Image (tube, helix red, strand yellow):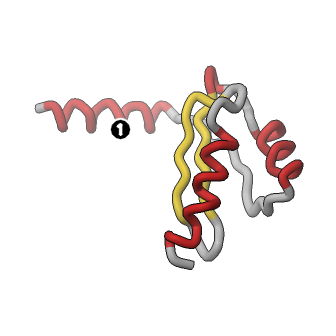
Amino acid sequence: PPRSTLFPYTTLFRSCWAGFPGVASFEICAADGEFLRCTLVSQDGLDLRSAVYDRVSARGWPLRELTRRQTSLEDVFVHLTRAEEEEA
């Protein structure tokens, strides 16, 4: 569907995750088909999966995938070296 069709859902998701306990930040973007991808960044490395599942289920929203991604040392190194290259 066109992005304009997903806009009401984007707004709904933003209101859902804004102020959600343990969420430091979030990003919402279009994914495959009629799905949106919501990337939540937790505070202090909290595992939010159970709380996210409970909230999504309570609203009756379909959930296609729920994963936890931890930052590796390699990810940190790449992030830091790219930042240094951009500053130079």
Examine the image and state in which quarter residue 70 appears.
Answer: top right
The answer to which of 46 and 35 lies nearer the viewer is 35
- Image position of 83 (left or right of 42): left
Q: Residue at x 59, y 47 (%)?
A: 39
Q: Residue at x 77, y 42 (%)?
A: 52
- Image position of 75 (left or right of 55): left
Count of numbered marks: 1
Residue identifier under label 1: 78
Q: Residues within 10 Å of mark 1 (few under 14, many from 20)?
A: few
Quadrant, the C terminus: top left
Quadrant, the N terminus: bottom right
The answer to which of 77 and 43 lies nearer the viewer is 43
Question: Where is residue 75 drawn, in percent x and y?
Answer: 44, 38
- Image position of 3 (left or right of 78): right
The answer to which of 71 and 19 lies nearer the viewer is 19
- Image position of 43 (left or right of 76): right
Q: Residue at x 59, y 56 (%)?
A: 10
Figure check: 16 above or below 20 = below
Of all residues, the one furthest to the top in this rendering is 44
The answer to which of 34 and 88 lies nearer the viewer is 34
Question: Where is residue 15 drawn, in percent x and y?
Answer: 64, 43
Question: Where is residue 19 drawn, in percent x and y?
Answer: 65, 30
Q: Find numbered disc 1 in the image and state the secondary structure of the residue it sits on.
A: helix
Of all residues, the one furthest to the left in this rendering is 88
Q: Amino acid at mark 1?
A: Val
